[in-house]
């Protein structure tokens, strides 16, 4: 028979009360926090699952923020494109109006005034910023104004061909913008045209070549799609000495003209294309006149404005005006097609935003429900448990108090 000493009984009772008190404190802490699992020690498996669900909820919240940013950017682009369509349609109306045979030169020049205003409007819209202050149509170069006017009144694209994306969910990246070169510059032209540029390595960076234009379509079409390369020679190549250049066909190196004297700002015409070179390029500086079947919307409007301001009522000028108006209508329709196609793309992306947001909300709701089932406390059950634990603790304490006060002297 095992005998239990009074000291062992005492220590056992104290230990039991400590355990019971700890249980009461744990239950009180759960009620205070409203959580079933306070530490990983309470339930390691539940704690691990809670951590996973919490991370998942945080990720969904980040995706939702991304979608809000994406939606704002796309709505800004959609608004700009809508206004651009309206502006191009107005230019088209003015083009048709300018074809009225009864109009005088003054009438056409009056139309040209509004066309200038519409051109400025188009450029301003193409240089629109989104809510975050970034240029919508600049590609990756959100801090760079995409369209800038150059010396001859035409416009160059200063952005790039990139497209910025935002993560909508684990497997979906959605474009938040479109580059302006594709929308406004790479537009099919009614006729073959030219594109000019200076070599970025030229030693005289102040010299400039105009955008160029086709002055004789038939001659240029016969030369198309060949390009011309203009290289400045030593001044000693001509007598009297002075700036001069040689023009060759780009693909063959065949000379178009050699040692041609350069007159600053003078119009030069070869193979049906004309251009001007301003400044004083150094020997070795290179310029290119590149063939193209595309024309930007800004140049289309400017060419029309220039024609309405300059063409007279002679039979020859009237024929040129008719050709200009017909070509302009084709180019405007092609520009509209490019913009409307982009509108459709943006609309599709906005639909993705709506669908993704609904998906994120549904997943988040499921995660929140599961998390609540694992982590959140059943208050009714906890209060009942606390009441029972408190009762047991108090009963144990009462019994301990009575027993610990007993001794043989109480029996005398």
Image: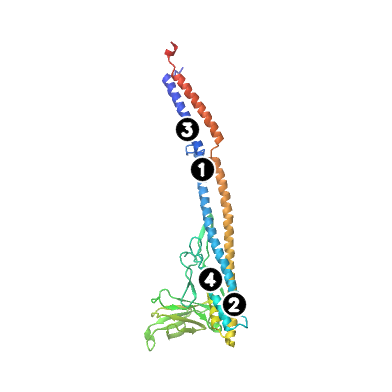
Disc 4, SS: helix
Q: Earlier in the sequence, mark 1 or mark 4?
A: 1
Residue located farthest toward the right when viewing the structure as drawn: 101
Query: Which of the two discs, 3 and 2, labels the residue nearer the N terminus?
Result: 3
Dividing the picture into quarters, in which one does residue 101 lie? bottom right
Which of marks 1 and 2 precedes in the sequence? 1
Return the x and y of residue 206 as percentages of the image width and height. 40, 76
Query: Residue at coordinates 53% horizontally, 40% vertically from top-left?
Result: 376
Disc 4 crowd rating (10 Å Cα; few below 14, some 14-19, many 20+) is: some
User: Could you give the CA–CA distance between mark 3 and mark 2, rounded to whole angstroms?
Assistant: 85 Å
Q: CA distance from mark 2 to mark 4?
A: 17 Å
Comparing 76 with 330, the one in front is: 76
User: Looking at the image, do the residues carrying marks 3 and 1 touch, with CB atoms under 8 Å apart?
Assistant: no
Q: CA distance from mark 3 to mark 1?
A: 23 Å
Q: Foreground mark, 3 or 4?
A: 4
Examine the image and state in which quarter residue 373 appears.
Answer: top right
What is the CA distance from the residue labelled 1 to the residue labelled 4?
A: 55 Å
Residue under pointer 1: 50
In this rendering, the label closer to the viewer, 2 or 1: 2
- Residue 297: % across, % down: 54, 73
Q: Which residue is mark 3?
A: 25
- How far is disc 3 from disc 4 in space, using C-alphas? 72 Å
| Residue of label 2 | 95
275 or 172: which is nearer to us?
A: 275
Q: Quadrant of the C terminus?
A: top left
Which numbered disc, 3 or 2, marks the residue closer to the eye? 2
Please give the label number shown on residue 360. none
Q: Which residue is mark 4?
A: 121
Label 1: few (<14), some or many (≥20) within 10 Å?
Answer: many
N-term mark: 3 or 1: 3
Percent from the top left, x then y, of residue 274? 49, 82
Q: Label 2 to label 1, Cα distance in Å?
A: 67 Å
């Amino acid at each position: 028979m095992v005998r239990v000493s009074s000291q062992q009984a005492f220590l056992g009772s104290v230990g039991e009360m400590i355990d019971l008190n700890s249980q009461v404190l744990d239950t009180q802490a759960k009620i205070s926090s409203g959580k079933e699992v306070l530490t990983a020690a309470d339930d390691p498996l539940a704690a691990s699952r809670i951590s996973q669900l919490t991370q998942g909820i945080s990720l969904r919240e980040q995706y939702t923020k991304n979608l809000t940013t994406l939606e704002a950017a796309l709505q800004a682009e959609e608004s700009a494109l809508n206004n651009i369509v309206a502006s191009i349609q107005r230019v088209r109306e003015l083009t048709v109006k300018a074809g009225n045979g009864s109009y005088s030169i003054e009438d056409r020049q009056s139309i040209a005034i509004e066309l200038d205003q519409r051109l400025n409007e188009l450029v301003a819209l193409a240089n629109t910023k989104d809510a975050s202050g970034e240029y919508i149509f600049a590609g990756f170069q959100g801090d760079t104004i995409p369209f800038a006017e150059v010396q001859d009144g035409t416009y160059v694209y200063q952005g790039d061909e990139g497209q910025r994306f935002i993560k909508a969910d684990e497997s979906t990246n959605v474009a938040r913008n479109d580059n302006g070169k594709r929308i406004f510059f790479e537009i099919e032209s009614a006729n073959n045209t030219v594109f000019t540029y200076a070599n970025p390595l030229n030693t005289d960076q102040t010299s400039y070549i105009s955008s160029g234009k086709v002055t004789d379509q038939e001659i240029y079409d016969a030369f198309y799609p060949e390009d011309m390369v203009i290289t400045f020679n030593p001044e000693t190549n001509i007598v009297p000495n002075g700036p001069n250049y040689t023009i060759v066909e780009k693909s063959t190196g065949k000379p178009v003209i050699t040692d041609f004297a350069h007159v600053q700002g003078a119009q030069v015409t070869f193979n049906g294309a004309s251009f001007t070179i301003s400044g004083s390029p150094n020997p070795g500086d290179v310029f290119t006149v590149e063939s193209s079947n595309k024309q930007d919307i800004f140049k289309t409007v400017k060419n029309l404005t220039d024609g309405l301001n300059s063409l007279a009522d002679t039979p020859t000028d009237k024929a040129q005006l008719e050709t200009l108006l017909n070509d302009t209508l084709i180019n405007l329709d092609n520009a509209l097609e490019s913009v409307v196609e982009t509108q459709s793309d943006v609309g599709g992306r906005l639909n993705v935003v709506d669908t993704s947001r609904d998906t994120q909300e549904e997943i988040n709701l499921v995660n929140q429900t599961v998390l609540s089932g694992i982590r959140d406390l059943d208050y009714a059950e906890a209060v009942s448990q606390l009441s029972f634990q408190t009762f047991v603790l108090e009963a144990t304490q009462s019994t301990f108090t009575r027993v610990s006060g007993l001794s043989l002297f109480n029996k005398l």
